[in-house]
Image (spheres, rainbow, N blue to C red):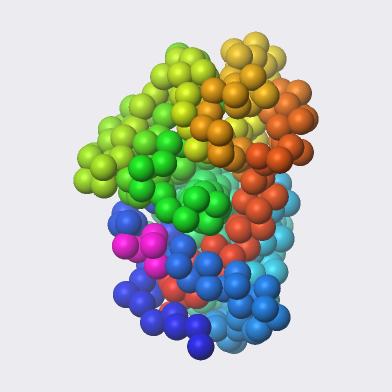
């Protein structure tokens, strides 16, 4: 019997920030349970009869499909809502949209550009709001990342996680997540592409309470040395296409190559949120090689988000 009783009902998941280690642990534990139940062919319809809206203002493969399938497996209905098809795309205010959708739906996930828009949605909605990626954060990705690392090593405390590349949305959410679980996190980024200072400071405060640490360093080799997980994301995120050539130049030394992996722990795994650009931030033999946990990581989006919804949707 899967137990979803919790103190998390009604909570938003717009950012890792307000979520404690205990809160996140509930999600990771339930995600493991839902994954095992699904593998055993048991039903996981612990959230029957709800309707979850999914607003997308950017493209998606994993987030869209894992939410749509996950909601169905919970016994609920998912509604895919392209932002361009909503009146939101013609200027209807976020506030009005949030008021109205709260009357129809039981929860809403939003993928958009500005974090402030997701925060405004959450402020005005009376249902839980989930961040499905903004320019600033990708907290659902961080849940799957933490789940995957814990699944491979049986723990998070004391592990070293190295992130190589852009100090972007994925980096920031991973950093916050690692900080809450006693991980020694290091991001290797070029000087102009470091994660925002305020986010680093916030993560350091959290890490100080868990025995973890947060470092931002200039060299990929420095971050990767002794790491248990080496993580890459694209050099050019959605919405940054005009900067592509400058970014390709700036990040050329920030890739997961076999040589970089030799510096990591002998049992190190490779992570990438996907989509990957082979030959840019990750080499082909690394992405498809024996250390790659990338496909488990992508699968775990499904289990982690099912757990999240099962816990926050009243
Ligand atoms: N990792 C991730 O969020 O992938 P999508 O952009 O395909 O949803
Ligand atoms: N940083 C990437 C992540 C894609 C899942 C982007 O925002 O495009």
In the rendering, at what x and y percent does residue 140 appear? 52, 54
Q: Residue at x 22, y 46 (%)?
A: 209
Magenta region, mostly helix, strand or loop?
helix
Q: Quadrant of residue 20?
A: bottom left
Indicate left or right for 191 with 274 as reference.
Answer: left
Indicate left or right for 58 with 218 as reference.
Answer: right
The foreground one among 98 and 187 is 187
Was residue 35 drawn as part of the magenta stretch in this picture? no
Quarter of the picture containing the C terminus is bottom left
Q: Do we see residue 73 in this rendering?
A: no
Was residue 24 drawn as part of the magenta stretch in this picture? yes
Q: Is residue 69 above or below residue 238?
A: below
Q: Is residue 117 above or below residue 307?
A: above
In the rendering, at what x and y percent does residue 85 appear? 71, 57
Q: Is residue 241 above or below residue 190?
A: below
Q: Residue at x 53, y 73 (%)?
A: 33
Q: Residue at x 39, y 82 (%)?
A: 5
Q: Quadrant of residue 38?
A: bottom right
Q: Do we see residue 295 in this rendering?
A: yes
Q: Residue at x 53, y 67 (%)?
A: 32
The foreground one among 125 and 36 is 36
- Which stretch is magenta? 22-26
């Amino acid at each position: 019997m899967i137990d979803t009783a919790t103190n998390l009902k009604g909570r938003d998941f717009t950012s890792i920030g307000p979520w404690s280690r205990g809160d996140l642990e509930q999600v990771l534990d339930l995600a493991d349970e839902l994954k095992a139940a699904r593998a055993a062919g048991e039903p996981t319809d612990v959230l029957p009869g709800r309707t979850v809206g999914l607003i997308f203002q950017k493209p998606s493969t994993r987030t869209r499909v894992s939410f749509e399938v996950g909601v169905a497996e919970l016994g609920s209905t998912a509604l895919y809502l392209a932002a361009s098809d909503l009146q939101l795309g013609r200027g209807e205010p976020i506030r009005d949209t949030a008021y109205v959708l709260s009357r129809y739906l039981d929860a809403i996930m939003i993928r958009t550009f500005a974090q402030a828009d997701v925060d405004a949605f959450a402020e005005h909605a009376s249902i839980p709001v989930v961040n499905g990626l903004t320019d600033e954060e990708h907290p659902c990705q961080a849940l799957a990342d933490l789940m995957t690392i814990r699944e491979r090593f049986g723990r998070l405390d004391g592990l070293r996680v190295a992130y190589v590349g852009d100090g972007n949305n994925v980096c920031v959410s991973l950093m916050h997540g690692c900080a809450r679980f006693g991980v020694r996190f290091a991001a290797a980024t070029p000087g102009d592409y470091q994660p925002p200072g305020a986010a680093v400071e916030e993560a350091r405060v959290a890490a100080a309470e868990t025995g973890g640490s947060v470092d931002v360093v200039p060299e990929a080799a420095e971050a990767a040395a002794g790491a248990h997980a080496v993580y890459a994301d694209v050099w050019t995120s959605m919405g940054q296409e005009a900067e592509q050539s400058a970014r390709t130049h700036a990040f050329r030394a920030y890739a997961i190559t076999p040589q970089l992996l030799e510096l990591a722990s002998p049992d190190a795994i490779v992570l990438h949120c996907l989509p990957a650009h082979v030959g840019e931030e990750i080499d082909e033999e690394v992405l498809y090689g024996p250390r790659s946990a990338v496909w488990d990581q992508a699968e775990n989006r499904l289990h982690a988000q099912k757990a999240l919804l099962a816990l926050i949707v009243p």
